[in-house]
């Protein structure tokens, strides 16, 4: 079961298209996962691995980065990985075809929300277990699916936080205290000189 | 959510306890209870009258001048002081303005008993607030945003003394011909009160601006320094946000809880025997077929249909089917969706199936004998269908729901319609519809109700479904496809507008005001989610809102106050947008200035909203008394506190000269009248309209416009798009203005009457109506100058409002003559006073 699909620009994490998840049907509250997905989109950059599976409890995030666009989906852990990546691959082919050239220039969030229609259709064909004909092609295309990196979502999100925290600390160190220390030192030197001068002025 | 409901309800009623504690005016003249205060708690601010003298406004401004001068000399900025007009410049110009305006037209003393022709010959414009030129130039359009008092009193005690209601009237989603739209990654807002930057903020310097609502100093972000319009850097005060009081932002992703929803339209149709009998299905299906390509939306737009009688019928419209499938659910006690994902379908992909269904639907139920109506269950099913996405539910109902949940009983006794006794059953009979509406509101579903019925339908109960879900109610009494062609025409035209007009989804609106003022009661269709956040699952361009305000802290140091309404919505194209309106008004400290700034139409509109609430929570006679008292109290207060020379007669300032007339018009309005036979549903519908209509349309409902049209000339005519539109003068609503030789047009907002006198000028009959017999409902298109003039004038009136009113041509002895004559407000009827008698009554009460 694919619960959520988000397409975002890697450069700044701007969401480009998404499929509204149906809370009613799955009976889950996806709000928390949605904010995780948003954070994740912002964390990703050009250095991130281009295929990755992130575990978060009983659900898994899977993403695929291609041509500067990230395709992220949230699935149940039991849903076959092959299928998910075939689905993301399929989204990428269609999305790149339709909007690829306009991706770098847009500024509005969800500029290509109309792609939702395609996402929903694709989702339907991939989650339909009776549509076995899909599997044949998937087997041949994605034999290397086992090599896809697996990580934990918390680690990924926290790693980013730790890094940014370190960054701010470092910049604090370099910028703020300099002037106060310098002033204190200058005043101290001045007073010491004065005392020495007063003490030994007759010499 | 339960708490919220209670909280909201707690805001509305006006406990009589408050009455006891209203401070009686010092001069001891207030023998009458304050009509305005009866509506609103007015305890606030009374204890705040004493002030520490160290904090004079004057010293404050002096200090500011010094600061500004220092700044100018220090930074060597080119001669213009930073940003917009700072407070330092305001005070002298304001003082000058109020000096000029203390004598002028608005305060001219009018003796209402002596001057007969008070009605201005042209529609009344909204009064201009007394602001310096440069602020007034950028101020919000009064059609969108106006205040009952264009000069805000400094303290609550001053407001209590003036005895006029303080409130705002809004038309936030009005169709605008020109609207600046800004796209930027950061929207500049105040960091503490979240106000959007607007033309009335002050720039302390290039890098800092001061919020005009909470006075916090904020930084100007780097991006804001660049002006995209002039492509110049370093001019933050010339950005479009600071130049326009009405502006729209494209929202960044922080303003979205979920991806923007698609446009979703679900139609819920009554197909019982009664409904088929009225023949509305044909009109509906044809109208939707005609406008199916004009429905607002994009490639994601979804539609769905549900029909119901004693069972609920769903329609499977999945792509690939050769024809629509009907699925019947007869278990109305525990409703479920027979198939979850093919009932709401993509309009573009399944258009042929939808069209197929619309063509067949009227024939499908041609021979039905089912008379029962399970509306409650149908609504529950529709809610289930829409709740994953949100959207708009349009419900068409033709009779009292009498089966399953939400079943209602007839509560109206036709014999009591005209009795002078108090009107019962104005409040809902069950809370089923309200509860369901709140569920809908939570899932971003709005319910619009079309009621087409000859019988009593208990609109007071049914209307709740739209009221709390921010929908709208349309009512077509005695709709029948053969017997009532005028209603059919109106239904057709309304549907066209309804289906094609702009729509905003999953919206919220927040109204902020300057520190010291507080908003306490809201009027309109919505649900109040938190104290000042209105939840609007749908917003449409024909919705109006009103709010009441009180002054919590004295506004001594302030020259001006501001109000800001921000509406966040998803457009039908899936864009999240924020529309922001900001209104700026001066603060005054004398009663005469408050009276000079009174906006009589806005006051009437707000009083009407308050009176509707009052008649539901207390009683109709209470509401009527309160309205009369509002007129008595404000005029008495004017006489005692403002007038220096006491003259005999009923004196009013020129700006309030129409106030007694409008109050009388309200008392004779369908919503509040007594003594005249009025069907309960008609009355409740009029009440809904008064609360929900934007002021311009509500005013026509309250006080219709009467014109003489048999002698139209081009003199003083308007010229719009090469068309000459004659401008006859507005006549008083009195039979004395009619005469048998003329033809008169009465515009009541939803209906226009063209009354043709018995001895009407034969030239008019032949040249305009085309024939000596004039029973037709349409004006023929004749190629004569007179006909063109008449049609141009009527067309112009129609163009000014969203829903086209139907035109009834009535003869002297026609049946409709009575409804035409009922609008003759200034005349006496067996149950109500004439205008002159009403004035005498007011005078008597004032001089008591």
Image: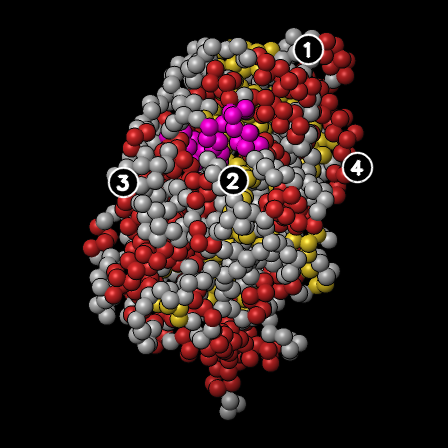
In the image shown, does A154 or B369 lie closer to the viewer? B369
Q: Which residue is mark 1?
A: B322
Q: Which residue is mark 2?
A: B811
Between the C-alphas of marks 4 and 3, the distance is 73 Å
Between the C-alphas of marks 2 and 3, the distance is 31 Å
Residue B119 is one of the magenta-drawn residues = no
Tags 1 and 2 touching, CB below 8 Å: no
Of marks 4 and 1, the one in the foreground: 1
**Chain letter belonging to callout 2:** B
Determine the residue positioned at 48% across, 31% down: B476
Of marks 1 and 2, the one in the foreground: 2
Query: Do badges 2 and 3 share one subunit?
Result: yes
Determine the residue positioned at 58% across, 29% down: B264
Q: Secondary structure at mark 3?
A: loop
Tags 1 and 3 touching, CB below 8 Å: no
Determine the residue positioned at 44% across, 26% down: B454
Quadrant of residue B345 in the image?
top right
In the image shown, does B477 or A16 lie closer to the viewer? B477
In the image shown, does B314 or B142 lie closer to the viewer? B142
Crowd around label 4: few <14 · some 14–19 · many ≥20 (10 Å): few
Q: Which residue is mark 4?
A: A101
Tags 2 and 3 touching, CB below 8 Å: no
Q: Which residue is mark 3?
A: B420
**Chain letter belonging to callout 3:** B
Of marks 4 and 2, the one in the foreground: 2
Note whether residue A71 is visible: no
Crowd around label 3: few <14 · some 14–19 · many ≥20 (10 Å): some
In the image shown, does B88 or B491 lie closer to the viewer? B491
Q: Which residues are the magenta region?
A: B461-489
Across and down, in percent, residue B596 comes to 43, 68
């Amino acid at each position: 079961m694919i619960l959520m699909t988000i397409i975002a620009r890697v450069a700044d994490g701007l969401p480009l298209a998404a499929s509204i998840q149906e809370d009613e049907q799955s009976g889950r509250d996806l709000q928390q996962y949605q904010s995780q997905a948003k954070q994740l989109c912002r964390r990703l950059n050009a250095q991130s691995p281009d295929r990755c599976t992130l575990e978060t409890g009983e659900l898994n995030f899977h993403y695929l980065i291609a041509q500067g666009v990230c395709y992220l989906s949230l699935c149940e852990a039991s849903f076959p990985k092959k299928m998910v990546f075939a689905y993301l691959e399929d989204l990428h082919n269609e999305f790149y075809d339709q909007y690829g050239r306009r991706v770098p220039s847009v500024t509005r969030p969800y500029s290509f929300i109309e792609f939702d229609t395609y996402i929903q259709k694709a989702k339907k064909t991939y989650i339909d277990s009776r549509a076995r004909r899909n599997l044949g092609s998937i087997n041949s295309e994605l034999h290397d699916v086992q090599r896809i990196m697996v990580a934990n979502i918390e680690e990924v999100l926290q790693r980013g936080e730790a890094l940014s925290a370190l960054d701010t600390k470092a910049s604090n160190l370099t910028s703020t205290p300099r002037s106060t220390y310098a002033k204190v030192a200058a005043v101290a030197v001045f007073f010491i000189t004065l005392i020495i001068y007063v003490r030994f002025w007759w010499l | 959510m339960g708490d919220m409901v209670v909280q909201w309800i707690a805001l509305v009623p006006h406990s009589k306890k408050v009455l006891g504690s209203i401070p009686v005016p010092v001069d001891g003249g207030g023998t009458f209870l304050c009509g305005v205060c009866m509506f609103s708690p007015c305890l606030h601010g009374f204890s705040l009258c004493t002030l520490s003298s160290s904090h004079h406004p004057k010293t404050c401004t002096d200090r500011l001048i010094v600061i500004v001068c220092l700044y100018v000399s220090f930074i060597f900025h080119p001669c213009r002081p930073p940003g917009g007009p700072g407070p330092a410049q305001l005070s002298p110009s304001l003082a000058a303005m109020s000096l000029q305006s203390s004598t002028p037209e608005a305060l001219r003393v009018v003796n209402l008993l002596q001057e007969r022709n008070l009605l201005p010959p042209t529609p009344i414009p909204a009064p201009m607030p007394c602001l310096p030129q440069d602020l007034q130039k950028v101020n919000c359009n009064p059609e969108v945003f106006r205040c009952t008092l264009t000069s805000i009193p400094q303290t609550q005690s001053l407001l209590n003394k003036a005895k006029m209601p303080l409130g705002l009237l809004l038309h936030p989603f009005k169709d605008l011909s020109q609207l600046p739209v800004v796209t930027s990654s950061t929207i500049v807002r105040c960091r503490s009160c979240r106000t959007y930057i607007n033309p009335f903020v002050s720039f302390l310097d290039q890098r800092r601006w001061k919020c005009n609502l909470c006075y916090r100093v904020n930084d100007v972000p780097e991006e804001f320094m660049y002006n995209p319009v002039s492509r110049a850097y370093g001019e933050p005060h010339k950005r479009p946000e600071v130049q326009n009081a009405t502006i729209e932002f494209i929202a960044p992703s922080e303003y979205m809880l979920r991806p923007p929803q698609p446009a979703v339209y679900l139609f819920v149709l009554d197909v019982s025997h009664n409904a088929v009998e009225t023949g509305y299905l044909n009109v509906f299906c044809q109208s939707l077929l005609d406008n199916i390509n004009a429905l607002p939306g994009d490639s994601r737009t979804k539609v769905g249909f549900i029909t119901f009688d004693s069972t609920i019928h769903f329609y499977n419209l999945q792509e690939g089917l050769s024809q629509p499938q009907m699925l019947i659910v007869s278990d109305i006690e525990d409703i479920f969706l027979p198939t979850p994902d093919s009932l709401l379908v993509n309009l573009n992909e399944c258009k042929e199936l939808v069209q197929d269904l619309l063509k067949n639907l009227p024939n499908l139920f041609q021979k039905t004998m089912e008379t029962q109506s399970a509306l409650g269950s149908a609504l529950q099913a529709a809610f289930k269908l829409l709740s994953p996405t949100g959207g708009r539910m349009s419900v068409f109902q033709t009779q009292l729901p009498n089966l399953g949940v939400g079943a209602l009983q007839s509560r109206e006794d036709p014999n009591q319609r005209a009795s002078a006794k108090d009107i019962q059953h104005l409040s809902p009979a069950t809370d089923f519809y309200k509860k369901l509406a709140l569920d809908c509101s939570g899932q971003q579903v709005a319910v619009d109700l079309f009621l087409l019925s000859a019988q009593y339908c208990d609109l007071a109960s049914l209307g709740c479904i739209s009221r709390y879900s921010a929908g709208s109610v349309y009512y077509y009494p005695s709709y029948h496809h053969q017997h009532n062609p005028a209603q059919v025409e109106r239904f057709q035209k309304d549907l066209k507008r309804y289906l094609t007009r702009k729509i905003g989804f999953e919206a919220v609106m927040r109204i902020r005001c300057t520190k010291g003022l507080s908003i306490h009661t809201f009027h309109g269709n919505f649900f109040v989610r938190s104290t000042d956040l209105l939840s609007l699952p749908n917003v449409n361009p024909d919705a109006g809102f009103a709010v009441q305000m009180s002054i919590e802290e004295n506004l001594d140091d302030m020259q001006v106050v501001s109000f800001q309404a921000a509406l966040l919505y998803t457009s039908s194209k899936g864009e999240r947008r924020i529309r922001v309106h900001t209104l700026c008004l001066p603060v005054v400290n004398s009663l005469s200035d408050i009276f000079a700034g009174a906006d009589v139409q806005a006051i009437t509109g707000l009083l009407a909203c308050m009176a509707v609430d009052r008649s539901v929570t207390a009683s109709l006679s209470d509401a009527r008394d309160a309205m009369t008292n509002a007129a008595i109290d404000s005029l008495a207060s004017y006489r005692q506190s403002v007038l220096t020379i006491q003259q005999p007669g009923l004196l009013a300032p020129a700006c309030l000269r129409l106030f007694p007339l409008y109050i009388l018009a309200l008392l004779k309005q369908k919503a509040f009248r007594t003594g005249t036979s009025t069907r309960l549903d008609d009355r409740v519908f009029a009440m809904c309209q008064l609360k929900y209509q934007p002021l311009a349309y509500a005013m026509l409902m309250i006080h219709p416009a009467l014109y003489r049209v048999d002698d139209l000339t081009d003199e003083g005519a308007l010229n719009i798009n090469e068309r000459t539109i004659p401008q006859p003068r507005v006549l008083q609503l009195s039979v004395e203005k009619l005469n048998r030789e003329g033809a008169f047009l009465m515009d009541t907002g939803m209906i226009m009457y063209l009354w043709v006198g018995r001895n009407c000028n034969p030239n008019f009959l032949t040249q305009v109506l085309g024939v000596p017999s004039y029973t037709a409902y349409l004006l023929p298109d004749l190629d004569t100058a007179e006909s063109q003039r008449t049609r141009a004038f009527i067309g112009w009136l129609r163009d000014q409002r969203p829903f086209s009113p139907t035109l009834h041509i009535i003869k002297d002895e026609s049946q409709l003559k009575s409804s035409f004559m009922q609008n003759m407000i200034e005349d006496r009827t067996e149950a109500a006073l004439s205008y002159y008698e009403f004035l005498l009554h007011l005078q008597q009460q004032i001089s008591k």
